[in-house]
Amino acid sequence: MCVHNRDRALCHRLDAADAPRLERCGPSCANAARAAQHANHLLQHAQPLEKQAASEALPGPLADRLSQRVGQLRAPADRHVDDRINAQEPTA
């Protein structure tokens, strides 16, 4: 999800458009925002890849690439969990 702020948008480095360029969207952009459902989806996608990477039947280079992809999926999900703001009930 993009919370488009043109001044921080990585997708605007090459042009002067006022709308986000979704084909250039990247996970490291300051405008990228994730809800819990997005983080959960990333983790669900990473789980089967992690199991495949752990398989002894898989050639080493392919297992390494799968492990790298798992890390790419887990990093933003973990960052979301670490950085999220939880609404708290007022204390009496």
Image (spheres, grey):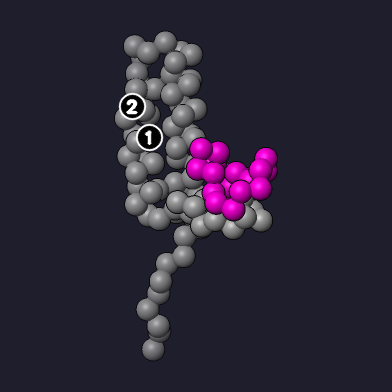
- The reply, left or right, for residue 51 in relation to residue 79 is left
Q: Which residue is mark 2?
A: 51
Query: Is 39 placed left or right of 17 in the picture?
Result: left
- Residue 5's image quarter? bottom right
Q: CA distance from mark 1 to mark 2?
A: 9 Å
**Residue 26 on the magenta segment:** yes
Position above or below: 43 against 69: below
Residue located farthest toward the front when viewing the structure as drawn: 17
Q: Residue at x 40, y 48 (%)?
A: 39
Picture coordinates of residue 16, whole percent (x, y): 66, 48
The amino acid pointed to by label 2 is: Lys
Q: Can residue 31 be seen by looking at this rendering?
A: no
Pinpoint residue 73: horizontal percent, then vertical percent.
Answer: 45, 37
Q: From which residue to which does the magenta span run?
A: 10-30
> What type of secondary structure mainly makes up the magenta span?
loop
Q: Which residue is mark 1?
A: 46
Image: 65 above or below 58: below
Q: Residue drawn at (38%, 49%), measured in percent from left and top?
A: 38
Q: Secondary structure at mark 2?
A: helix
